[in-house]
Amino acid sequence: MSPSKNKEPTIKRDDPMLAAEYSLGLLEGEELLEARGKMTSGGIFVSRKDWWDNWFIPLSDEMDGAAPDAQVWERINAAVNAKESGADAGADVVSLKTRLRNWQIAGSTAAAAAVAAVALMVVSPGQDPAGSAPVIAAQQAPLMANVPIGDTNLRIGVTYLPEAKEMLVSASGLTADGVHDHELWLVPADGSELQSLGVVVAGEERRVTLPAEITGNMGDGVAVVLTREPLGGKPDGVDAGPVVAEGAFTQV
Amino acid sequence: MVRAATPEAREALKSAMARLADGDQSALQEIYDATSAKLFGICLRILGDRKEAEDALQDVYVNLWQRADRYDPARASPISWLATFARNRAVDRLRSGKVRQGAVPVEEAAPIPDAAPLADSLLIDAEKATQIHACLEELEERQRGAIRSAFFDGQTYAQLAEDADVPLGTMKSWVRRGLQKLRGCLEANE
């Protein structure tokens, strides 16, 4: 059936349409990446998505309310208190070494290298000499993301250490083309604008301390995307470049 | 079971969000008490599993505490924003592969025992709910059905196409025509 014989109006797949599809969660693959790319530039696309969110969410009034188990509040409270004291008080204490070993078995070399570097960073400064192994609270477990690059075997390893609020990005397998840089973005779970995690330096490992507005969005399952940008990263006031890769954080 | 939020309840929630942004930890419990039944209902519907839904709920409130200053009253009412946040978090979890795809719908799951009765939950916005329902009613059944499944069950285009046994392109075309019409209707009602 050709469009001319079709009585229905032609579909305009414009930004408001893409924002609706993104708001509902219909998209996958390249279309999802396209929408996420637009979420990095802020402004009108984010407002369009908010517009749809605010129209769709009243539909949730049809969903029955339900009481969560009382333990959920206790867990939230414990997690908040642990973060507040910055210590491991009251939380399960697990050995970072075990987690690292598990990750190294399951993960890629780039990510494992990133973990190894982080382990050094954790252990060396001001480690309690009495402690037999570096321990951190379960709530403070490191987050790791593998971002595979296209069909290659290359991947960027991103590690985030909640306690230190530090992120380590390992792009040791990558080479610079001299024309582009790649910028890493966090996709906040609350649907707000993407946050830049900085330009990835090909062939290097980079360690940065993240500000509170980013660390608050870090969590298990939170996505990161990589965009291709002019040298120096996305210029102000323009859309981000194409999304070339994506991954998600997993708690180690 | 839902109840309309009184203006007092809305103001109390708004004020608790402001206090939380100022670092008042006691505001978190107030927000939790007022909204957790609503948000848990959303997570449970999307994820179809109590344990998963409770984990998603925990993520939402811990994240909220970490970044209480991110809520912008200009973007949405507190309850709309929190409900959207909970739905997004639940959908992320559904897609992360940790949750069995095609989990048993809540209606078909084992009945929830009396120990955990359905809880009162805040209505978001009765007026907007009426309007979006009216606009959805104007769509063809297949358009409306697909849009509702995407919202209520967190289904992607690919899953909708599979369930309806139509090619992916056909499903996209149905939904996009539906969304286009829906937009026109909602804009006309603003």
Image (tube, coloured by chain):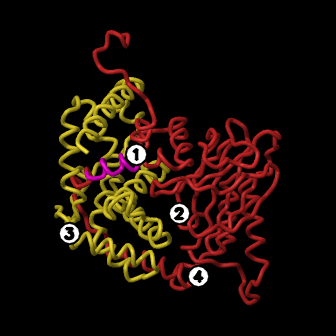
Q: Nearer the viewer, mark 2 or mark 3?
A: 3
Characterize the local packing of mark 1: few (<14), some (14-19) or many (20 or more) Cα atoms within 10 angstroms.
many
| Location of residue A234 with respect to B113 vertically, above or below | above
Query: Which portion, as a residue range, is magenta?
Result: A48-58
Q: Is residue B115 magenta?
A: no
Q: Is residue B50 above or below residue A175?
A: below
Looking at this view, is B144 or A45 the one in front? A45
Residue located at (76% from left, 84% from top): A126
Residue A217: mark: 2
Q: Do labels 1 and 2 touch, CB within 8 Å? A: no
**Structural distance between the alpha carbons of marks 2 and 3:** 30 Å
Tell me the number on the disc at residue A86: 4
- Chain identifier matching the red colour in the rendered picture: A
Residue under pointer 1: A23
- Dot in front, 4 or 3: 3
- Identify the amino acid type marked 2: Asn
Query: Which label's residue is closer to the chain start, 4 or 1?
Result: 1
